Amino acid sequence: MESESLVYSLDEALAAVGFGKFQILVLLYAGFGWFSEAIEIMILSFVGPAVKLKWALSASQESLLSTIVFAGMLTGAYSWGIISDNCGRRKAFLSMTVITSGAGFLSAFSPYYTSLVFLRGLVGFGLGGGHVFLSWFLEFIPTSHRGKWMVIFSTFWTLGTIFEASLAWIVMPRLNWRWLLALSAGPSFALLLFYRLVPESPRYLCLKGRAAHAHQILEKMALVNQKELPLGMLVSYETIKVDEENPSEHTSVISVAREKISSFRSSFSSFFMLFSSNLIGTTLLLWVLFFGNTFVYYGIVLLTSELSTVRRKCDYTSLQTENLGEDSLYTDVLITSFAELPGLFLSAITVDRFGRKLAMAIMFVLAWVFLLPLVFHQSAKVTTALLFGARMFSMGTFTVACIYAPELYPTSVRSTGAGVATAVGRIGGMVCPLVAVALISSCHLKEAFIIFEVVIAVTVICILLFPFDTSGRKLSDSVDSSDLTQSLLSGSSNCTPSSSAAEILPPKIKF
């Protein structure tokens, strides 16, 4: 009886080793992944105009350079989620970074417009797996530290935008867009250099029944953090399922269970699991959340650069007073990127204190408040200040949403669920220029801002409809209906037997 009690779960092991030097190293690698993604996204603001001038492109051809990247990210987000959940986080990292770095560097030598479009599409496909870095980092963090460190992780995106704007300011006036493309691929190559040092997620290994491998990684974590693991044996999800169902036929049931799990994990099984009775409500609400967040965030970024040009065309009173210099594009992007820093700070102090849902709702409502005066004509300085505030709160909401998404799903579909939600968000990024920016370019500023206000309002309603908050809850591992109810909604981990079968479950959302 005593030996049977000497077992511990993955969550207990993570709590024992705490957050230390090992997680800092994981943070740096995963954060650098997001840093490189932000660079490749922000480069679109600088390369498009330069390429248009060199090859005498039309406005639609120039916009295609941005659209193709988002289209690639749309397909990549789903594909890398499937690969990550079925083949492991590390294998996804390797494939993603090879494609992103290779296509990004080769695009600097594109002889024709069509080759550049093709290569940037490949870059977008590789960038679509950025959410895998987030899920991977999340699975190394003890529950008590999750919110704070996930926000710190998000700062790497903002640092990437600031870095790219600074690099463009230095490179573009002195060299050309080809140099900017080549140098911007550097961070992705750096990820490849350190790939061999990257450990697999112990939570993913635990789910796969590879408890011995997971235990080796946990031992390294304990050694680096100068902590000790709990006494006993790490018990994986499969072992516990066998013990609960039929302990007398332990070995044979394990074999059968593994065969069932292996067959269940086909290429599309993870995707269809998102529409199971336990997950469909959460999945659809999350899609609206990411669509609205991405639509508004990229809309505000585009508005910052578009409004100055549009005012000169639509507001004749400012024709003589507004004279943009050669460096205005780099200056505007650099300054507005700094608006994300206070947004990250706000998300850091609210994500655990108020919970994910309330933090997102409050900050998105404040973004709505800052955009509301822009429905009516405002001076240039007031407009800049309002957009600064709107981007700050939009970034804060986006940060918490990126934390919330992978927490909602069990380990076996975590990357797929977060990836599909991210892909739906990319649709918002593709639609935004076609709708809102097109209206602004045709001098319909009022209608454009009304669209932003409506999108925010609908998104806030969906945030409030989520049936539960993940703040302070353990991550779930199970995908079967019996354990999903217990673990996903109540928050207990399936790497150990459920501690409380009588927990009151939040209501399901049905559509």
Image (cartoon, rainbow, N blue to C red):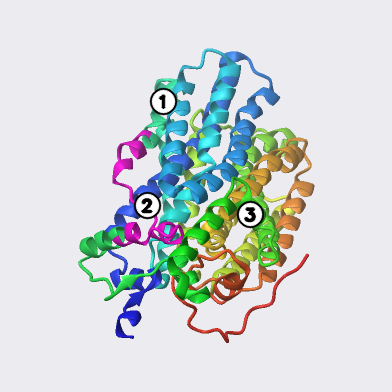
Residue count near mark 1 (Cα–Cα under 10 Å), binned few <14, some 14–19, many ≥20:
some
At mark 3, the secondary structure is: helix
**Position of 247 relative to 177 (above/below):** below
Residue count near mark 3 (Cα–Cα under 10 Å), binned few <14, some 14–19, many ≥20:
many
Q: Quadrant of the C terminus?
A: bottom right
Q: Which residue is mark 2?
A: 200
Q: Is there any visible trace of residue 56 in the rendered image?
A: yes
Q: Which residue is mark 3?
A: 290
Whichever of callouts 2 and 3 sits on the residue coming sooner in the sequence is 2
Task: Identify which amino acid the numbered label 3 is placed on.
Answer: Phe
* Nearer to me, 178 or 300: 178
Task: Identify which amino acid the numbered label 1 is placed on.
Answer: Ala
**Position of 67 relative to 200 (above/below):** above
User: Comparing marks 2 and 3, which lies closer to the viewer?
Assistant: 2
Q: Is there any visible trace of residue 380 in the rendered image?
A: no
Whichever of callouts 1 and 2 sits on the residue coming sooner in the sequence is 1
> From which residue to which does the magenta span run?
189-215
Report the disc number at residue 182. 1
Tell me whether circle 1 and circle 2 mark residues in contact (CB < 8 Å): no
* Nearer to me, 323 or 137: 137
Task: Identify which amino acid the numbered label 2 is placed on.
Answer: Glu
What residue is shown at x 45% (from left), y 62% (from top)? 345
